[in-house]
Every structure is written in C-alpha cells, then in structure tokens.
Amino acid sequence: MGTIYTAGYGNMAIDRFLNLLKRHKIEILIDIRSRPYSKSRPEYRKQPLDRFVRKEGIEYIFLGDKLGGRPKAEAFYSPKGTIDYELLQQSPSYKQGVSELIALADKSDVCIICAEMLPEKCHRGFLVSETLYKMGIETRHILHGGNLMGHGELRAKFKGGQMDLF
C-alpha cells in the first residue's frame, strides 16, 4: 500500500504547493473540498488545479462529493446549522469515498487536499484521517513548511489522543 498524505494550500503560491507534492513524491492528488472553488486563489479552482498537477505528472481526482466536509444534504446539519460529522461518517456516500481513497492508495502515494492549512482544523484531519486511523491506516500530514506529522502524533495533542469531531 502507498502512503496517504494530507495537505492544505491556504494562501500558498501554486508553485510552492506543487513543489511540496513533488518533494513527497505524490502520484495522485485527491481533492476533498465540497466546493472545489477559491475566490481568492483561482489557480486552486478545480479545472486550473487539475491542469497544474497534470503538468507535473500528478493525477487529479475529485472526491469532494463523497468526502467533503460540507455535505449538500440537510440531514447532516443540526437546527443550528452545525454539521453532524458522526452521522456523516455513517453515510453510504462517505463510506464509498473512503473505500475509493483506500483503493487508490493501494496502488500509489496519494494526497488528499483541502484549503485549510492546519489539519487539526480541517475535515481532512478530524474526519477523514480519523476514520482511516480507526481502520488501522496512518495518514501523514504535510505541514506548511513541508515537514510531515503522522496522524497518531497529531491526535495525541487532542483530548487524550482522540480528535474532536466538532
């Protein structure tokens, strides 16, 4: 099995982001943003990002419809508008997305991405990586400077070793 990395681009220049992906030998970039759009960074919109990574020999796959942190269905939201991530984890669509992610990682080193820089503040950390961790699969978070942090190390910083889903 390949490695599953995670990364957030934040306000990072696209060239720097691509260099981080190449540095860690990412073969497939998996976009898990619910809405693959950036108003302030148009290069991170779905089509431009796809073109940029393919120029670098990296495949682009969108799974935000299954693994995104802001689902369309209102059933996943409380009356106050907060997302019930525990309920989302149980949905067939989310489970299918996790299965697809694992299947891709069986063959290649992959990186799931979102906009948020900090994995502990992003659903790629507290939702997707946590799901994988509970399945015995350790993700590696690419931090802003390019260093790596295993998900087990990240979760040790929170509530006795378990990430908070809220």
Image (cartoon, rainbow, N blue to C red):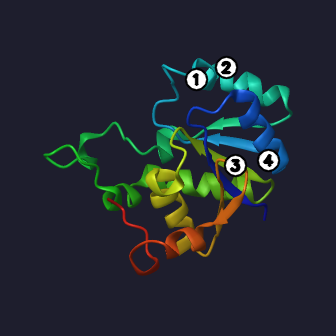
Q: Is residue 55 above or below residue 127?
A: above
The reply to whether callout 1 and callout 2 are in contact (CB within 8 Å) is: yes
Label 2, on which residue? 48
Q: Are marks 3 and 4 in contact (CB under 8 Å)?
A: no
Which residue is located at x 61 percent, y 26 percent? 44
Q: Between residue 142 and residue 57, name the one nearer to us.
A: 142
Alpha carbons under labels 3 and 4: distance apart: 16 Å
- Residue labelled with disc 3: 145
At 65% from the left and 52% from the top, the residue drawn is 143
Label disc, if present, on residue 45 of the rendered structure: 1
Residue at image position (54%, 50%) is 97
| Cβ atoms under marks 4 and 2 closer than 8 Å | no
Sequence-first tag of 1 and 3: 1
Label 1 SS? loop
Image quadrant where residue 117 sits:
top right
- The residue indicated by pointer 4 is 26
Q: CA distance from mark 1 to mark 2?
A: 6 Å
Say above or below: 84 vs 150. above
Q: Nearer the viewer, mark 1 or mark 3?
A: 3
Extreme front residue here? Answer: 145
Choose the circle earlier in sequence order: 3 or 4: 4
For residue 140, above or below residue 53: below
